[in-house]
Image (cartoon, helix red, strand yellow):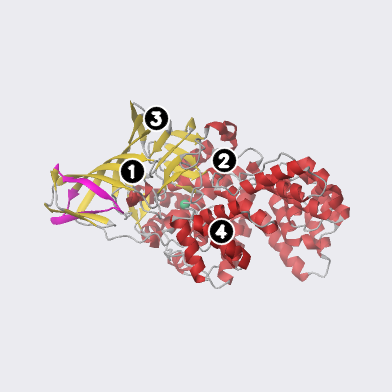
C-alpha cells in the first residue's frame, strides 16, 4: 500500500489473523460476483477446491455478515454453522483426498467494497471498487483472513454492460445477456486473499507492452484523455527497470492500473491490478508538484515484494513496505538521477530522526510500527544493507530469496539467511541495529550518505561552517552558492537559511529560473518586502500550481493596492486536483473590495461553498471546508456536508471532519445549529452527532 501522506499515527491494527487450518490446503477458487448498486449488496457464488492433509471433521472460511442459500461439499448438502465472522462446514474429510465446496451467498458489505456516486444525479461518477488489505476480503467473498493461504483465484463478474469491469488476471471472455455483461478473468498462479480486487466504472484504457512482453493497461476516465501522458509518465521505464533490477521475471500475466475516486490510500498493489487514487490524475503542470511516479513504482515493486513472496504475518511487514519503498526510490534514481535519490534518502532520515528524538523510535520488527517506520526507515535499512554487502551480492541475495519463496510466505529471517548465503557474511549486527533496535543511527547514516553524494557532503560542510565560523551567514553561503550547485542543494539552502539572506541575494536566486528554487523562495516568505515585489509578481507565471497559489496569497496580503491586478492575472486557473488555485482565487475575489458586481459575488460564493458537497472528491471537499471555515461561518448546507464527511470511508477525511466538528461544538451558537440540524439526520450521521452531543 502507499499512503497519501505518511501519517505517523496510522497503525497496522488491521492485521490480526485468524488461526490457520493446517489440515487442509485450498488451491483453487472459481468466483462469480453480481454486485447490485441499488442496495449496495452483492450476490456471489464460489467453488473452492482443496486437499486434505490430515483427516479432520470440519473446515471453515472467513465470511463477514453473509447469508448462505446453498452450501455443498462435492455437490452434496452439508451441515454447517454460520456466525457473523465465519462459516464452518462439518464433514468427515479424509487425508490425501481432494474435495470441492460450493457456496451461494448474499451480503451487504460494511467495508472492503465501496459503492460511490450511485445516490447522486450525476451518472459518470458511479464506481464500485474494493480494498482488501487491512479491510478483509471476507467482507465480500468467503475467503481467508490469513495471508498464508494462497489460492489461484478465477473471478467472474456480472454487471451493467455500459460499465467497464476490471479484476485480477487475464480477461478471457465476455458474455452479453440483455443489459447485463459477464466478464471472465483467469489467473494462473496462487496469491493471498487480501490481493483480490475488482473495479467498476467508466473507463477507457491505453495499452502498452513491456520489453519482456508483459501487457499493461492504463485505465483513465473517458474525459481525461489529455491527462494520460502526464499521469502515467515513465510507466514503461519503471516496469522495465524493476524487471531488470530485481532480476526475476514479473510473476503475473499482465499489469493493470485503475484510478478510483475517494480511495483510502495513495495506491494498493492488488495482484496485477493496482488501484490508485484519482487525485493522481494530473496535467503536465501538476507534474512538478504532484505526480504518480513514486506510487506507480511502489505498487509495481509490490508485485514481487508482497504479492509473489508474502509475509507470514505483520511482524515481517518490512518485507512488503520497506522493499516497495526502496525499489520505488531506485526507479526514481534511474529517472531523476543521483542527487534526487540522495536528497530523498536524507529527507526520510530526517523524518525518522525526528520521531526518534521525540522518544518514539520504532523497530522494523514491531508489527504495530507506524508507516514512517515501515516505509521510510525500511527503505533506508535496505540502502544500508546494500552498501554493506555490495551491489552484486545484494542482487544475488534478492534473486535467491524470490526464487526460493515464490508464491509462498516469508519471514525476515528467511530473507536475512538468503542475504547471508549470497554475501557469505554475518548480518547479526545489521539485524540488531537496523531491524530490532528502536533507536535510529542518524549520524552513522549521514556519514554513509555523504560518502556517496557530493551534494550532501557540501551541505553538511556548510552546516558545520555556519555553526562554527565568525563570518556572516550570507558571506559563507554566497561562497558555496557561486560554485556549481544542484537544484536540490540550492532549495535546501533557501529552506534552511532564508532568514539570513539579503534582498540582493534573493533577487539572484530568483534569476536561476529554477521552478523549485523559486517555489522555496515563495513559501519561506510571509510578507513580501517592497524591494522584492517585482520578483514575486513573476511567480504568478511559473508553471507550478503550488507556487501560483502561494504567490497569489502573499501578493494579495502584502500589496492591497494591486489586488485586482493579481486576481485578473490568475482568473480561470484551476490548479492541482484539489483545485488549490481556484478555491483560493474565489475566496480572495469575494473578499476584494470593488472587484466584483453583486451578482458575480453571489456566483463565486456559491461556487466556493458548493465544493463541500459530496459530489466532489474528498480532496476538494477538505480544501473547501478548510478555506471557508477560516473566514466565513459555514452555511447549513456546509454543515450537512460536514456531518456527511464525518462518516466518510476515508479515515483521513473522516478525522479531518470530526476535528472540525469538535471545534464547532465548542461554540454554543454552532452547537445549537448542529443540534437543530440533527433532526434531519439519520443512520450513521445521526449516531455520530448524537454521540458528540452526549459527550459534550
Ligand atoms: Zn506499499
Q: Please tell me whether mark 2 sits on a helix, a strand or a loop.
A: loop
**Mark 3 CB within 8 Å of ligand 1:** no
User: Mark 3: few, some, or many residues within 10 Å (few <14, many ≥20)?
Assistant: some
Q: Is residue 490 magenta?
A: no
Residue drawn at x 68%, y 44% is 582
The magenta span reads 51-75
Q: Please tell me whether mark 1 sits on a helix, a strand or a loop.
A: strand
User: Mark 4: few, some, or many residues within 10 Å (few <14, many ≥20)?
Assistant: some
Name the residue beneath numbered marker 4.
656
Asked whether, in this view, residue 361 is left or right of residue 17, the answer is right
Q: Is residue 276 above or below residue 315?
A: above
Q: Tell me which numbered mark, 3 or 2, is placed earlier along the sequence.
A: 3
Name the residue beneath numbered marker 1.
42
Q: Is residue 192 above or below residue 175?
A: below
**Mark 4 CB within 8 Å of ligand 1:** no
Give the alpha-carbon distance from disc 3 to disc 2, as whole Å: 25 Å
Given residues 24 and 451, the one toward you in this image is 24
Q: Tell me which numbered mark, 4 or 2, is placed earlier along the sequence.
A: 2
Give the alpha-carbon distance from disc 1 to disc 2, as whole Å: 29 Å
Residue drawn at x 71%, y 39% is 572
Give the alpha-carbon distance from disc 3 to disc 1, as whole Å: 17 Å
Name the residue beneath numbered marker 2.
281
Given residues 428 and 593, the one toward you in this image is 593
**Mark 1 CB within 8 Å of ligand 1:** no
Name the residue beneath numbered marker 3.
161
Front label number (4 vs 2): 4
The reply to whether callout 3 and callout 2 are in contact (CB within 8 Å) is: no
Q: Tell me which numbered mark, 3 or 4, is placed earlier along the sequence.
A: 3
Asked whether, in this view, residue 677 is left or right of residue 418, the answer is right
Amino acid at each position: 500500500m502507499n499512503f497519501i501522506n505518511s501519517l505517523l499515527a496510522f497503525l497496522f491494527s488491521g492485521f490480526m489473523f485468524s488461526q490457520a487450518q493446517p489440515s487442509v490446503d485450498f488451491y483453487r477458487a472459481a468466483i462469480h460476483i453480481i454486485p447490485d448498486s441499488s442496495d449496495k449488496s452483492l450476490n456471489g457464488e464460489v467453488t473452492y477446491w482443496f486437499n486434505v492433509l490430515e483427516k479432520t471433521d470440519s473446515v471453515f472460511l472467513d465470511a463477514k455478515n453473509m447469508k448462505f442459500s446453498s452450501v455443498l461439499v462435492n455437490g452434496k448438502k452439508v451441515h454447517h454453522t454460520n456466525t457473523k465472522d465465519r462459516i464452518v462446514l462439518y464433514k468427515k474429510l479424509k487425508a490425501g483426498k481432494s474435495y470441492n465446496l460450493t457456496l451461494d451467498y448474499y451480503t451487504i458489505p460494511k467495508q472492503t467494497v465501496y459503492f460511490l456516486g450511485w445516490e447522486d444525479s450525476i451518472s459518470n461518477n458511479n464506481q464500485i471498487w474494493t480494498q482488501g488489505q487491512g479491510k478483509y476480503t471476507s467482507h465480500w467473498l468467503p475467503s481467508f483472513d490469513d495471508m498464508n493461504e494462497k489460492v489461484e483465484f478465477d473471478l467472474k463478474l456480472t454487471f451493467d454492460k455500459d460499465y467497464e469491469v476490471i479484476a485480477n488476471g487475464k480477461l478471457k471472455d465476455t458474455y452479453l445477456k440483455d443489459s447485463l455483461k459477464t466478464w471472465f478473468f483467469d489467473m494462473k498462479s496462487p496469491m493471498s486473499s487480501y490481493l483480490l480486487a475488482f473495479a467498476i466504472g467508466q473507463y477507457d484504457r491505453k495499452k502498452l507492452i513491456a520489453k519482456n512482453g508483459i501487457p499493461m493497461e492504463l485505465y483513465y476516465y473517458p474525459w481525461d484523455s489529455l491527462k494520460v501522458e502526464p499521469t502515467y509518465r515513465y510507466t514503461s521505464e519503471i516496469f522495465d527497470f524493476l524487471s531488470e533490477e530485481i532480476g526475476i521475471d514479473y510473476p503475473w500475466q499482465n499489469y493493470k492500473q485503475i484510478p478510483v475516486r475517494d480511495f483510502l490510500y495513495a495506491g494498493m498493489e492488488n495482484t496485477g491490478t493496482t488501484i490508485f487514487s484519482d487525485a493522481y490524475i494530473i496535467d503536465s503542470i501538476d507534474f512538478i508538484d504532484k505526480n504518480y511516479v513514486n506510487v506507480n513504482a511502489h505498487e509495481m515493486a509490490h508485485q514481487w515484494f508482497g504479492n509473489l513472496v508474502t509475509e507470514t504475518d505483520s511482524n515481517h511487514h518490512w518485507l512488503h513496505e520497506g522493499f516497495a519503498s526502496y525499489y520505488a526510490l531506485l526507479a526514481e534514481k534511474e529517472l531523476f538521477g543521483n542527487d534526487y535519490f540522495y536528497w530523498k534518502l536524507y529527507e526520510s532520515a530526517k523524518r525518522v530522526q525526528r520521531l526518534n528524538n521525540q522518544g518514539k523510535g520504532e523497530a522494523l520488527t514491531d508489527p504495530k510500527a507506524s508507516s514512517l517506520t515501515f516505509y521510510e526507515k525500511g527503505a533506508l535499512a535496505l540502502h544500508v544493507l546494500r552498501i554493506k554487502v555490495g551491489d552484486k551480492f545484494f542482487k544475488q541475495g534478492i534473486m535467491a530469496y524470490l526464487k526460493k519463496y515464490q508464491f509462498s510466505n516469508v519471514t525476515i529471517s528467511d530473507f536475512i539467511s538468503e542475504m547471508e548465503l549470497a554475501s557469505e557474511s554475518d548480518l547479526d549486527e545489521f539485524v540488531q541495529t537496523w531491524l530490532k533496535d528502536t533507536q535510529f543511527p542518524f549520524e552513522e547514516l549521514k556519514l554513509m550518505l555523504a560518502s556517496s553524494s557530493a551534494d550532501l557532503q557540501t551541505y553538511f560542510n556548510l552546516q558545520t561552517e555556519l555553526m562554527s565560523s565568525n563570518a556572516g551567514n550570507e558571506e559563507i553561503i554566497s561562497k558555496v552558492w557561486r560554485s556549481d550547485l544542484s537544484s536540490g542543494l540550492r532549495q535546501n539552502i533557501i529552506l534552511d537559511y532564508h532568514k539570513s539572506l539579503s534582498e540582493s541575494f534573493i533577487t539572484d536566486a530568483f534569476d536561476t529560473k529554477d521552478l523549485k528554487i523559486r517555489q522555496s523562495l515563495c513559501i519561506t516568505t510571509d510578507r513580501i518586502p517592497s524591494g522584492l515585489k517585482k520578483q514575486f509578481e513573476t511567480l504568478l507565471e511559473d508553471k507550478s500550481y503550488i507556487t501560483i497559489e502561494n504567490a497569489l496569497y502573499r501578493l494579495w496580503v502584502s500589496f492591497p493596492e494591486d489586488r485586482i491586478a493579481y486576481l485578473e492575472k490568475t482568473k480561470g486557473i484551476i490548479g492541482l486536483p484539489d483545485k488549490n488555485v481556484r478555491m483560493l482565487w474565489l475566496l480572495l475575489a469575494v473578499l476584494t473590495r470593488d472587484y466584483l458586481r453583486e451578482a458575480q459575488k453571489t456566483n463565486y460564493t456559491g461556487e466556493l461553498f458548493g465544493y463541500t458537497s459530496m459530489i466532489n472528491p474528498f480532496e476538494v471537499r477538505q480544501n473547501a471546508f478548510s478555506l471557508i471555515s477560516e473566514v466565513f461561518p459555514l452555511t447549513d448546507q456546509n454543515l450537512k456536508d460536514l456531518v456527511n464527511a464525518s462518516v466518510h470511508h476515508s479515515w483521513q477525511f473522516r478525522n479531518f471532519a470530526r476535528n472540525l466538528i469538535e471545534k464547532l461544538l465548542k461554540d454554543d451558537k454552532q452547537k445549537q445549529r448542529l443540534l437543530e440540524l440533527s433532526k434531519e439526520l439519520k443512520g450513521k450521521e445521526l449516531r455520530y452527532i448524537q454521540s458528540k452531543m452526549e459527550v459534550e
